[in-house]
Image (tube, helix red, strand yellow):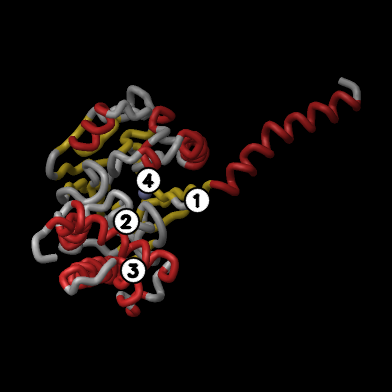
Amino acid sequence: MNKHNWLLWLTAFAIAGFSAPMVWASEYRIENVKGDVYRFIDDRHRSLFLVTDEGILITDPLNESAAKWLKAELKKRFDVPVRYVVYSHNHSDHIYGAEVFDSSETTFVAHRLAKQDIQNTGANTVVPDMTFDNSMDISLGEHTVELRYHGPNDGRGSISMLFQPEKLLFVVDWVVVGRMPWQKLWSYDIQGVINSTRDVLDLDFEVFVGGHADIGDKADVRRYLSYMEELYAAVIDGIHAGKNLEEMKQSITLDNYSDFKQYDEWLPLNIEGVHERLMEESGMSWRPGL
Ligand SMILES: [Zn+2]
């Protein structure tokens, strides 16, 4: 090999070997949360994975490109097989890309209603091969991941996952800490979200990780619940008082929560979302006397 060819080869190696992962690295991130549980971040989306001597359990794969990056990182950092992929719910922005992990040694787990929706709508991801109705425990190494269904809240078959012994709770979309819930509370069953959040507060957890926004603790989840309860009650009161949506956007301020990110931008949208849901799902728009 002459000097010129050697340089060309070196350049090609540099592009193939270093450039691509560097582009990836700026998009995706892995951080240790507690014990053997790690958070995987793709822009606004987050998922968790657990590493044990007996293998890895991952939660939402997020999307194909994120899943490919994660798979390569898991191989590089830990080099144990991925034993489980557990879907938080049915929404494609969280559970696409699972085919990247499809193998005979990996079991795909979801709530029965999430699987039903994935099948019926022809979602382009792996159809779960293990489902449950109320709760299911997965043991891996010295760890247990407790999966629970708390009734309807957001999407179909959306569950909580409690990692033990870390006492770490993971919920996607229907509990958000450090930030306002998303815009017009797209796809929220509001009373269901409140009921499910009350339910998880009875669980023994110390750390909370959401599918979006920040990491928090039990007090943060309690505060999110208070926000949702106060928002819901304020809009119901407004409708009973004969106020229209624009008047409510002016009068409902919920100042106690002004430290939540996106408070100014999304409070009017949150109010609109609750109003829309009450008018349609609770039928307040065609109720005599309102
Ligand atoms: Zn989401």
Which label number is shown at residue 76?
Answer: none
Residue at the image point whose x is 62% and y is 40% from the top? 21
Q: Is residue 140 visible?
A: yes
Residue reaching furthest front? 289
Question: Which residue in the structure is indicated by mark 4?
Answer: 49
Q: Which marked residue is nearer to the observer: mark 1 or mark 3?
A: 3
Location of residue 246 with respect to 39 vertically, above or below: below
Q: Are marks 1 and 2 in contact (CB under 8 Å)?
A: no
Disc 1/disc 3 C-alpha distance (Å): 33 Å
Ligand 1: does it lie within 8 Å of the C-beta at label 2?
no
Residue reaching furthest left? 288
Q: Which marked residue is nearer to the observer: mark 2 or mark 4?
A: 2
Disc 3/disc 2 C-alpha distance (Å): 18 Å
Query: Which numbered disc flags the more N-terminal residue, 1 or 2?
Result: 1
User: What kind of element bears circle 3?
Assistant: helix
Residue type pointed to by label 3: Glu
Residue type pointed to by label 4: Phe
Residue at the image point whose x is 60% and y is 49% from the top? 26
Residue reaching furthest right? 3
Residue type pointed to by label 2: Leu
Query: Which numbered disc flags the more N-terminal residue, 3 or 4?
Result: 4
Question: Which residue in the structure is indicated by mark 2?
Answer: 185
Disc 3/disc 4 C-alpha distance (Å): 43 Å
Q: Position of residue 232 (x, y in %)?
A: 22, 66
Query: Which numbered disc flags the more N-terminal residue, 2 or 4?
Result: 4
Query: Which numbered disc flags the more N-terminal residue, 1 or 4?
Result: 1
Question: Which residue in the structure is indicated by mark 3?
Answer: 246
Residue at the image point whose x is 31% and y is 77% from the top? 251
User: What kind of element bears circle 1?
Assistant: loop
